Image (cartoon, grey):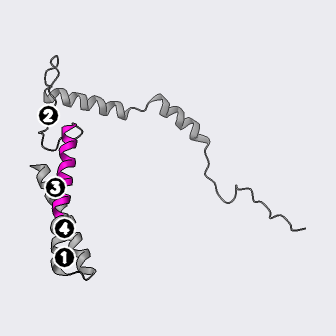
Amino acid sequence: MFKLGMSLVFAFISAMVIALAGLVSDVRLMTVLLRSLVGFLVAGAVVWLVAFVLEAKELVGFDKNLELMENPEGEEPKSPEEYEAEDEAAAAEAEAPSAEMQTSDEDNADFQPLTSNNLKHMEAPSDN
């Protein structure tokens, strides 16, 4: 059903573009309608065929339902208490500063931002 809806939407858009282009270029109304109808049919058929081929090659699954992942056979679902315990352990681990962060803080202790006083000013070369 999705393939049909998608092809109808693209076909309608192409027919409207063809009709607008024909009306702007002062073509007879009958010619605009005929071209729009042919564009509608061709664009709808092309989009439907492309969607059909993509689904047949299993590159996309437009009409397929989502397959939910099943639990591995060895594991049982966790209780809310187990999830809360994992969250608390992760939060405690994130709050504790690691040794790497402490050494990087020590390395940055002698950092001084640039100011106009500690910059070396260069003189412009003379034109001799």
**What residue does disc 4 label?**
15
Residue found 53% across the figure and 37% down from its top = 105
Q: Identify the secondary structure beneath mark 4.
A: helix
Q: Would you name the residue on which mark 1 appears?
A: 31
Check if residue 19 falls in the magenta segment: no
Instruction: Work out which residue is located at the far left of the displayed protein and give it.
Output: 1
Sequence-wise first label, 2 or 4: 4
Residue 41: say if magenta: yes
Label located before the other in sequence (2 or 3): 3
Q: Quadrant of residue 52 in the image?
A: top left
> Percent from the top left, x then y, of residue 81?
15, 28
Q: Indicate whether 107 appears above or below 23.
A: above
State the residue in front, 109 or 126.
126
Disc marking residue 67: 2
Q: Distance from label 4 to label 1 (Cα)?
A: 13 Å
- Decide which of tag 1 and tag 2 comes sooner along the chain: 1
Residue 7 is tagged as 3
Q: Closer to the N terminus: mark 4 or mark 1?
A: 4
Q: Amino acid at mark 1?
A: Thr
Query: Element under label 1?
Result: helix
Disc 3 marks a residue whose amino acid type is Ser
Where's residue 109, x and y in %?
Answer: 58, 40
How far apart are the alpha carbons under marks 1 and 2? Answer: 48 Å
| Number of the front mark, 1 or 3 | 1
Q: State how far apart marks 4 and 3 are (Cα).
A: 12 Å
Q: At 26% from the left edge and 31% from the top edge, which residue is drawn?
A: 88
Of label 1 and label 3, which has the lower sequence position?
3
